[in-house]
């Protein structure tokens, strides 16, 4: 690899405030915000809106759609040709 053309790949904390979850991983993303991790080191922190701890698919709290109601709504809107 050529030197000085690739972004830095370093440890970063991703934090989902809505689910009170934070995990340390490596990334090329950067941030001005920092957090002290349990190992005593300070890492850049990136806040995310959705993670596996808050996404309905992973939590099992997904909405149940009324499929029959959706079909009726579609037929009312576009109707069947007579």
Image (cartoon, rainbow, N blue to C red):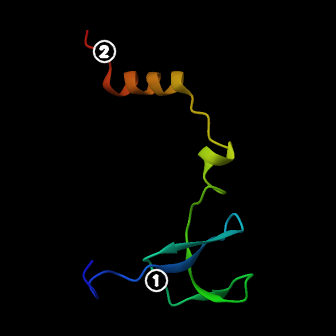
**What element does badge 2 sit on?**
loop
Q: Which residue is drawn at 31% across and 25% down?
A: 78
In the image shown, does 36 or 63 lie closer to the viewer? 36
Query: Which residue is situated farthest in the top direction here?
Result: 82
Looking at the picture, how far across and down is residue 13, in whole percent? 59, 76
Q: Is 57 above or below relative to 72?
A: below
Circle 1 crowding by C-alpha within 10 Å: few under 14, some 14–19, many from 20: some
Query: Which residue position is annotated with label 2?
Result: 80
**Disc 2 + disc 1, Cβ < 8 Å:** no
Real-space Cα distance between discs 2 and 1?
54 Å
Query: Which residue position is annotated with label 1?
Result: 30
Q: Is 57 above or below relative to 73?
A: below
Looking at the picture, how far across and down is residue 44, in whole percent? 56, 85
Looking at the picture, how far across and down is residue 75, in whole percent? 38, 21
Q: Is 81 above or below relative to 27?
A: above
N-terminal-most mark, 2 or 1 = 1
Quarter of the image for the C terminus: give it.
top left
């Amino acid at each position: 690899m050529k030197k000085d053309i690739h972004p830095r790949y370093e440890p970063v904390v991703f934090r989902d405030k809505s689910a009170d979850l934070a995990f340390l991983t490596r990334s090329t993303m950067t941030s001005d915000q920092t957090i002290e991790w349990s190992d005593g080191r300070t890492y850049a922190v990136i806040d995310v809106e959705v993670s596996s701890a808050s996404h309905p698919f992973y939590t099992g709290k997904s909405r149940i759609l009324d499929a029959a109601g959706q079909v009726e709504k579609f037929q009312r809107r576009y109707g069947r040709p007579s």
